[in-house]
């Protein structure tokens, strides 16, 4: 049984590495690679922090050697990948913790670590310690939101627990709450942002509307999430006072 689980883990790891390399160019600019964070969180939840660290490292090395990506491919992935898995395990299976680990690990630690690497190794000038923080955080929020919605859906239909059990990973119960539902609604904005941006790029759509649409999706979903949270909390408070 143990050998079978290890084989499944290695197969899944290889698949995630392959998928990560293929989808990494989506919405990528220097200092922001949203889909890398999607892979990091999914791998952390399914396989744990060490496998996620290995996955991010191998994807980064492949991107650097085959795609000419600077060392940001590593500094912008490995810290978040590991912390996402650590936070997920430490919180006993909270998807929000996995998301937070990616944001902190990549958006803050990885961004700061990128400064000396890009300055002293790559010879970039005009950078500061916090130069990459805004773009790294933006990338983690987009990719992390997509991962959160994806994993929340797998949790709701029981598939996530089944996959973890077959892989020999710890199986947790992350119950749906008002907060998790609110974040799911807000996270759909990130998905729509990616879809609208890709559509504009693939079909070469131009005009003011296509410049505004991705950001409008973020704002609308964010507003809907706030309204939903307030409505649910108000209803819950009313029930308590009855």
Image: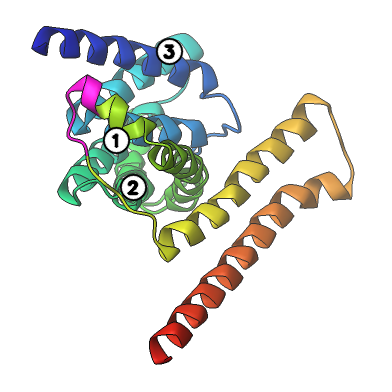
Helix, strand or loop at mark 3: helix
Q: Residue at x 79, y 47 (%)?
A: 211
Judged by depth in the image, the label closer to the viewer, 1 or 3, is: 1
Q: Residue 209 vs residue 158: left or right?
A: right
Q: Tell me the residue at 32%/25% (across/down).
A: 56
Q: CA distance from mark 1 to mark 2?
A: 8 Å
Which range is magenta?
Answer: 165-171
Compared to 183, does 115 lie above or below? above
Q: Read off the residue under disc 3.
A: 18
Q: At 73% across and 56% down in the image, what residue appears? A: 216
**With respect to residue 81, does 190 lie above or below?**
below
Report the residue marked by disc 1. 45
Residue 233 placed where, x, y %?
Answer: 47, 77
- Residue 76 in view here: no
The image position of residue 104, as x and y in percent, is: 32, 51
Label 2 SS = helix
Does the CB distance between marks 1 and 2 fall below 8 Å?
yes
Checking the image for residue 95, the label placed there is 2
| Residue appearing at x 82%, y 44% in the figure | 210
Earlier in the chain: of badge 1 and badge 2, it is 1
Q: Is residue 183 left or right of residue 117?
A: right
Asked whether 64 or 49 is in front, the reply is: 49
Disc 3 versus disc 2: distance between alpha carbons? 24 Å
């Amino acid at each position: 049984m143990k050998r079978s689980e290890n084989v499944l883990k290695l197969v899944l790891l290889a698949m995630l590495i392959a998928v990560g390399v293929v989808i990494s160019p989506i919405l990528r600019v220097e200092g922001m690679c949203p889909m890398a964070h999607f892979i990091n969180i999914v791998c952390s939840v399914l396989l744990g922090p060490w496998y996620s660290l290995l996955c991010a490292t191998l994807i980064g090395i492949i991107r650097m050697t085959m795609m000419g990506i600077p060392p940001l491919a590593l500094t912008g992935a490995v810290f978040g990948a590991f912390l996402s898995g650590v936070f997920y395990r430490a919180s006993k299976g909270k998807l929000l913790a996995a998301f937070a680990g990616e944001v902190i690990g990549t958006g803050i630690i990885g961004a700061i670590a990128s400064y000396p690497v890009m300055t002293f190794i790559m010879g970039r000038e005009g950078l500061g310690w916090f130069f990459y923080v805004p773009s790294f955080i933006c990338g983690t929020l987009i990719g992390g939101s997509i991962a959160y919605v994806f994993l929340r859906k797998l949790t709701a239909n029981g598939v996530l627990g089944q996959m973890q059990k077959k892989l020999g990973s710890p199986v947790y119960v992350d119950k749906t709450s008002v907060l998790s539902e609110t974040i799911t609604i807000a996270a759909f904005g990130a998905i729509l942002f990616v879809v609208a941006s890709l559509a504009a790029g693939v079909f070469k759509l131009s005009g003011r509307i296509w410049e505004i649409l991705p950001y409008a999706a973020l704002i609308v979903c964010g507003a809907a999430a706030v309204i939903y949270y307030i409505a649910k909390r108000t209803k819950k408070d009313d029930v308590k006072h009855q």
